[in-house]
Image (cartoon, rainbow, N blue to C red):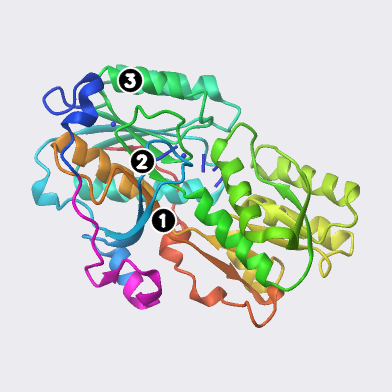
Amino acid sequence: MTIPKVLASLCCTAVLVIASTASAEQPAPTPVVNEANGIFSDPGKNSAEALKKAVTSENWAVPVVVVDCDLPGCDGARTPSVYTPLPVSEIKGKWNICAVIPHLKDPYWVGQNANFVAEAKRNGVSLQIYEAGGYTEISKQINQLNNCVAAGADAVIVSAVSSDSLAPIVERINNEGTVVIDLVNSLNTPAVTGRALFDHCTIGNFMGKHLKESGEAVKAVWLPGPSGMALLEKLMSCFSDSAGDKVEILTKLYGDTGKDAQLALVENAINAYPEMNYILGSAVTAEAAVSPLAQNGLSDNVKTASYYMTPGLYDQLKAGKATCASAGNEMILSRIAIDMAVRALEGKPFNGGKYVSMTANVICGPAAGEKFNNVDTMSKELNLPPEGFSPVFSVN
């Protein structure tokens, strides 16, 4: 993902949503549901075949978690549900939606782009997508949001390059009456209409639990991605809570999730921490680590664990060159974000709640040992971009 809305989760009509009263005018959400379109809220009950059929149909369905929080990262209740989009027959307006994302440097954001496009076409909305070029490009993303509003966007979907720095402009946009949906990375403000977020605590808990159960003492270096992302810190905190004293974190090395930046950090970690036996970080980190670990004769001694999945990492997991990765099933978050925007613009209730996240599991390849090798069970539709897809920036 580079992180990522993780990270914003992942837009206004004067009639339905006006200024700071937007949340007051939003109807109460629909109740959570245990089953819809052949999919259950309990992920363990869904076969790979049923899940693939559900997430690829026009009226798609996916298991989610509805989070009872005003701000991302809080400890509110998490209730399993099944998310289904608003039927096309109920969409009456012709809406203009604008989305800003951190970059398109890796397949995570290409996958989100693909699902933006698919849902915009399904709903018949106009969509404009801007990518900032990296997590250091705060001013550029602010300018892109201003351009969205100036061009007449009814709703904006914001996957922020900085949880805090984007908050003031989002608050202004929200107060001026534009629907705002917080996507993936999280915005550190309550002034949003809805959130479709990468659940960093869930991901961290699953990773920590896995390493705790691996049976080996872990001395790890964290390469989480860019600094200043509150939910990345939350991910690492929840990881530590679940891992307990079985895992020692030697250090945290921050940097952009571009491959060159992560490669340099991996090389620094190899030189500075010869005792490490695990590298934890982004999917780009895990991919970048393969070559320097091999060159230093460490492939069998240092394992990798990523907090999200990419096609390259999936291939390396299958080949035994990478060890494990969290499958957050979050490629569909951009579809949920567009559906949330349309629901708000149409005056329809949100599905289950205004803050939705995904379930998760840990996927490992043969490098993790026979006991943990489950790479063939992963849902590609929810974790990888469509093969051969090239980024699209406008849908009319």
Q: Nearer the viewer, residue 170 or 375?
A: 170
Dot 1 amino acid type: Met
Residue 225 vertical placement versus 376 (above, below)? above
Does dot 1 land on a helix, a strand or a loop?
A: strand
Q: Quadrant of residue 313?
A: bottom right
Q: Position of residue 119 (x, y in %)?
A: 28, 49
Q: Badge 3, how many Cα within 10 Å: few under 14, some, many 20+? A: many
Does dot 2 land on a helix, a strand or a loop?
A: strand
Q: Residue at x 63, y 57 (%)?
A: 306
Does dot 3 land on a helix, a strand or a loop?
A: helix
* Residue 390 in view of the camera: yes
Along the polypeptide, which appears first: circle 2 or circle 1? 2
Dot 3 amino acid type: Ile
Q: Position of residue 136 (x, y in %)?
A: 61, 28
Mark pair 2, 3: CA separation: 16 Å
Q: Badge 2, how many Cα within 10 Å: few under 14, some, many 20+? A: many
Residue carrying label 3: 173
Mark closer to the observer (2, 3): 2
**Left or right placement of residue 122 versus residue 272 in this view:** left
Residue carrying label 1: 358
Mark pair 3, 1: CA separation: 27 Å
Q: Position of residue 322 (x, y in %)?
A: 69, 65
Q: Residue at x 54, y 56 (%)?
A: 203
Residue 306 vertical placement versus 266 (above, below)? below
Rendered image: mark on residue 285: none
Does the magenta run of residues contain 46? yes
Q: What stretch of residues is rendered in magenta?
A: 29-51
Residue carrying label 2: 195
